[in-house]
């Protein structure tokens, strides 16, 4: 794209900050994050220099999967605030020039959604049941699940219900927790319902949607068995009868029409764990979603070949449809990159307790932080937009030792406590160095580190925003400076990239304006002539150390 940034659609270049609402900031003192908390930290986000926020589900929910089990798509979870507070927050963000993206969860609802309650209380074959995926069981007594699919969180993907007559009856599909029944997207009413939901929030000013499990809504006709021993991980290495079915694209073409009918370039971003990159391109066609998380990038390990291959594949795939790339290293579902980069962990593939939490005895946080800082400069210099997960700007490590009786992730329970799940990357943020108010997470100063919804470790305050604020070399200030440069540097954001060769251990590319990003995976080496704009580490005598990265203007 050679036209200037000011004339491009905002989301082609945007850096979006993911707010995991429960863990971001607690504005009412109950130990859980909320909308009031977000409002109180909007200035921090403005100073950080991001363009947009994505807020994880804030709808009324029994919180069996922390909001991804939605009981009512048209309201706000009382623990998080009210609809009018949400509207206020959207306006305040807009006044600061920050766009607001909200999460939408169309693959499944909560089992407390009124439709599901009606479905369970209605007869097999009824209109109410048809909004979800109910089937008779196999076996003489219907005692065997309808097929062999398993839930992403562990165990069968089917749950049997007790019918009105008190006998065991039909089964319903839940690709995730038991409390998250899958909608039936063959039912027209489901389509109409979600169109209404989109309009409801667009009318309230949101700038876009992050679409949960965007590759899962449509299931193959007949719900055929999968091969034995095939895992149901979110990352579908190949298409399965419940992942990446072609029918999803019709839904997105319709949603695109709705988005386009509103002023102000409303957008959507797909959470589609689809591989290879050419399949992702289908979601990015101009008449569909145009934006998706780059999970090939996220699942890279800290390895020059792996990263370069994934960057190349992604760039090739999007070129065919004219979409921008969107780079991401972290979110609320994967081990934090500080730990992953130190341990060589690859998230999302055959995760087990070991893979997820790694061999702690080998963990060297110093290396992890060094690499995560370099990763930030790499990600923010690549063509397109980027997503930052809250706490990434503080180089937060994973919390590996949450006491087992405090774990809340359904993955922990559905894996029969063999997989510790995702709580380790969801611990409430440390805003201040001192433990009071759960390290400044809560306005309630009496709350200690044990009292936020997930407990915080003793050392959490060392990473606090307060500690990093005045340290010019902190990761927080590295992000601030990089984002500031990114805003004015004409070659950054959407556009072209040109690799140049330095050595097989150095990843280096140019962007327009003689801009270069250099990441060193090997021994220290002398950088080319030019002006260093920012570096992840100190550069002495023009030497970039191992695991260091920098941006420079080439001479
Ligand atoms: C993906 C979300 O990111 C994850 O947190 C959630 O558990 C599943 N979708 C199910 O909604």
Image: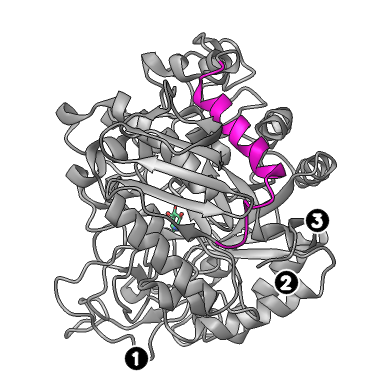
Distance between the alpha carbons at the discs numbered 3 and 2: 15 Å
Image height of 274 relative to 306, above or below: below
| Residue hosting label 1 | 222
Residue at 46% across / 86% down in the picture?
246
| Quadrant location, ligand no. 1 | bottom left
- Using a 10 Å C-alpha cutoff, classify the residue at mark 2 as few (fewer than 14 neighbours), some (14 to 19) or many (20 or more): some
Residue 178 in sight here: no
- Using a 10 Å C-alpha cutoff, classify the residue at mark 3 as few (fewer than 14 neighbours), some (14 to 19) or many (20 or more): many
Disc 1 vs disc 2: Cβ atoms closer than 8 Å?
no
Q: Earlier in the sequence, mark 1 or mark 2?
A: 2
Distance between the alpha carbons at the discs numbered 3 and 1: 40 Å
The quarter of the image holding the C terminus is top right
| Residue hosting label 3 | 205
Q: Nearer the viewer, mark 3 or mark 2?
A: 3
Distance between the alpha carbons at the discs numbered 1 and 2: 29 Å
Q: Nearer the viewer, residue 176 or 326?
A: 326
Secondary structure, mark 1, is: loop
Q: Earlier in the sequence, mark 3 or mark 1?
A: 3
The quarter of the image holding the N terminus is bottom right
Q: Is 476 contained in the magenta span? A: yes
Residue at 81% across / 56% down in the picture?
204
| Residue hosting label 2 | 196
Q: Residue 304 appears at what percent x and percent y? A: 30, 50
Residue 439 in sight here: yes
Residues in magenta, as a range? 472-496
Which disc, if any, is residue 483? none
């Amino acid at each position: 794209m050679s036209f200037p940034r000011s004339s491009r659609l905002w989301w082609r270049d945007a850096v979006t900050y993911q707010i995991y609402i429960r863990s971001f900031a607690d504005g009412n003192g109950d130990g859980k994050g909320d909308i009031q908390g977000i409002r109180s930290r909007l200035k921090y986000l403005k100073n950080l220099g991001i363009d947009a926020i994505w807020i994880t589900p804030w709808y009324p929910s029994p919180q069996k999967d922390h909001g991804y089990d939605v009981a009512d798509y048209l309201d706000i979870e009382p623990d998080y605030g009210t609809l009018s507070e949400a509207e206020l927050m959207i306006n305040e963000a807009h006044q600061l020039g920050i766009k607001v993206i909200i999460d939408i969860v169309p693959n499944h609802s909560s089992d407390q959604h009124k439709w599901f309650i009606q479905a369970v209380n209605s007869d097999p074959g009824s209109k109410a049941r048809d909004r979800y995926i109910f089937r008779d069981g196999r076996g003489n007594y219907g005692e065997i699940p309808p097929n062999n699919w398993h839930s992403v969180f562990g165990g069968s993907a089917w749950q049997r219900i007790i019918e009105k007559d008190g006998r065991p009856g039909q089964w319903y599909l839940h690709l995730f927790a038991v409390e998250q029944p899958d909608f039936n997207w063959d039912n027209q009413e489901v389509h109409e319902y979600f169109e209404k939901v989109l309009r409801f929030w667009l009318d309230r000013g949101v700038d876009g949607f992050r679409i949960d499990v965007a590759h899962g809504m449509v299931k193959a006709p007949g719900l055929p068995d999968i091969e034995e021993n095939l895992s149901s991980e979110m990352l579908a290495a190949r298409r399965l009868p419940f992942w990446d079915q072609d029918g999803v694209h019709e839904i997105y073409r319709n949603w695109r029409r709705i988005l386009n009918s509103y002023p102000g370039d409303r957008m959507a971003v797909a959470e589609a764990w689809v591989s290879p990159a050419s399949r992702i391109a289908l979601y990015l066609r101009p008449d569909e979603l145009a934006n998706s998380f780059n999970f090939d990038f996220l699942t890279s390990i800290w390895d020059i070949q792996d990263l370069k291959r994934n960057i190349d594949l992604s760039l090739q795939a999007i070129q065919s449809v004219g979409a921008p790339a969107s780079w991401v290293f972290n979110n609320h579902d994967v081990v934090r990159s500080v730990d992953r980069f130190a341990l060589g962990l690859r998230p999302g593939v055959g995760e087990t307790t070991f893979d997820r939490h790694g061999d702690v005895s080998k963990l060297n946080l110093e290396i992890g932080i060094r690499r995560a800082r370099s990763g930030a400069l790499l990600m923010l210099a690549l063509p397109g937009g980027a997503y930052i997960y809250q706490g990434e700007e503080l180089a937060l490590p994973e919390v590996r030792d949450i006491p087992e009786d405090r774990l809340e992730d359904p993955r922990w329970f559905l894996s029969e406590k063999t997989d510790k799940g995702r709580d380790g990357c969801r611990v409430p943020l440390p805003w201040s160095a001192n433990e009071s108010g759960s390290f400044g997470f809560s306005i309630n100063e009496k709350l200690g580190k044990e009292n936020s919804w997930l407990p915080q470790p003793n050392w959490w305050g060392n990473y606090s925003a307060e500690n990093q604020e005045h340290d010019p070399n902190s990761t927080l200030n590295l992000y601030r400076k990089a984002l500031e440069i990114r805003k004015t540097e004409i070659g950054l954001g959407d556009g072209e990239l040109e690799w140049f060769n330095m050595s097989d251990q150095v990843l280096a590319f140019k962007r327009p304006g003689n801009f270069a990003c250099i990441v060193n995976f090997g021994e220290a080496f002398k950088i080319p002539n030019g002006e260093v704009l920012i570096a992840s580490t100190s550069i002495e005598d023009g030497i970039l150390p191992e695991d260091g990265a920098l941006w420079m203007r080439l001479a």
